[in-house]
Image (spheres, rainbow, N blue to C red):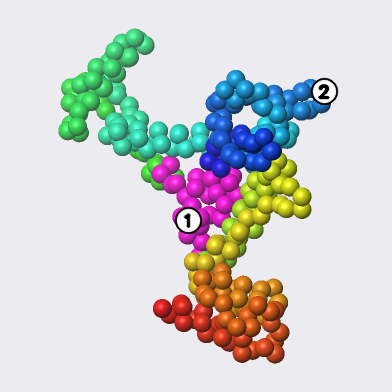
Amino acid sequence: MCSCLLNGNSYAHIIRNNSGQVTKLVIMPNDETTVTQDDTTGKLTYYFHGEKLNSSDVLHFKVFTQDGFKGISPIYALRDQIDIQHSKDDTVTKYFKHGYIGKSILTVLGSDLGAEAKQAIRDKFLKANDNDSGVIILDENTKYQNLPVDKSVVEVANEIDWTTRQVASALGLPVEILGVENEHSSNEQSMLSYLQSTLTYYFRCITSELDAKLATGNYHFNFDTSKLFTADTTVMFNMYESAIKNNLLTPNEARNKLGLPPVEGGDQLQSFSQTSQNDNFVNNSQNMNEN
């Protein structure tokens, strides 16, 4: 995923035995992999370490693509913001490095200087006053005026929250995932948003490729997202309790997910009249939480 997000593409060579069973997946670094497409059939061919590989022997993950052939890094959308960030860094650096001179006017009184003479005086002035003491030495025929610096420009240049939000937008991330406080969302809402708006899209890009190249029969790949909500035990218990009451899980299936031993009669889907079984499940879950 790191390679896919940074480079736009990531590859893995599918190694099979003589019976056609998958025995290993070998990462194919981007700089060691070449992909070509037949102009007529559209068939993809991969070259890795001098070996020619068919498309069926390579997992090719790409999150964003315009032609279905070559992936594009989401960071590409930030190229203008990256240029702006470099300019901001340069502005802040120059301000603190040369703030005591900065943009200024050096006037030589009673003289009519040509371009070369002005440049020579300027260079000598900068060289003579390029020190850490902050002291500028002038004679009676020279006048120095330091132009004021707009501090608001420096404050804007030093603001990083805007850039963080742009990165989150490009990757489809909720801003709180990157450490930006979002006072309008709870932890549960953030995790749900992270799953629905971000991970679900990335998961589909992965599972669709796995299904096409590795799945057999009626089997297919799915991500287990239940761990996203296990950090908050209250949310987790309520989720499993609701699943039991709505006949989505049996009590023992829920207990198994919580690492608890099965109970007698817990292998059947429960109805609302079977409150004793549900109470037993909830009480055991709460006791585990307290422990």
| The one of 17 and 73 positioned closer to us in this rendering | 17
Residue under circle 2? 40
- Amino acid at the residue labelled 2: Thr
| Dot 1: element | loop
Could you tell me residue 141's position as x and y percent?
Answer: 21, 20
Which image quarter: residue 124? top left
- Amino acid at the residue labelled 1: Val
Which image quarter: residue 21? top right
Residue 60 seen by the camera: no
Residue at image coords 46%, 78%: 288
- Span shown in magenta: 157-185
Residue at image coords 57%, 81%: 263
Neighbourhood count class around disc 2 (C-alpha, 10 Å): few under 14, some 14–19, many 20 upward = few
Where 280 falls versus 70 (above or below)? below
| Dot 2: element | loop
Q: Is 247 included in the stretch rendered in magenta?
A: no
Res 267 label:
none
Could you tell me residue 169's position as x and y percent?
Answer: 58, 48
Which image quarter: residue 251? bottom right
Where 178 falls versus 275 (above or below)? above
Q: Is residue 205 left or right of residue 142?
A: right
Residue 30 seen by the camera: yes
Could you tell me residue 56's position as x and y percent?
Answer: 71, 34
Q: Earlier in the sequence, mark 2 or mark 1?
A: 2
Between label 2 and label 1, give the one nearer the viewer. 2
Residue under circle 1? 180
Residue at image coords 60%, 83%: 264
Neighbourhood count class around disc 1 (C-alpha, 10 Å): few under 14, some 14–19, many 20 upward = few
Where 35 falls versus 114 (above or below)? below
How far apart are the two marked residues, 2 and 1, measured between alpha carbons? 49 Å
Quadrant of the rendering where the C terminus is positioned: bottom left
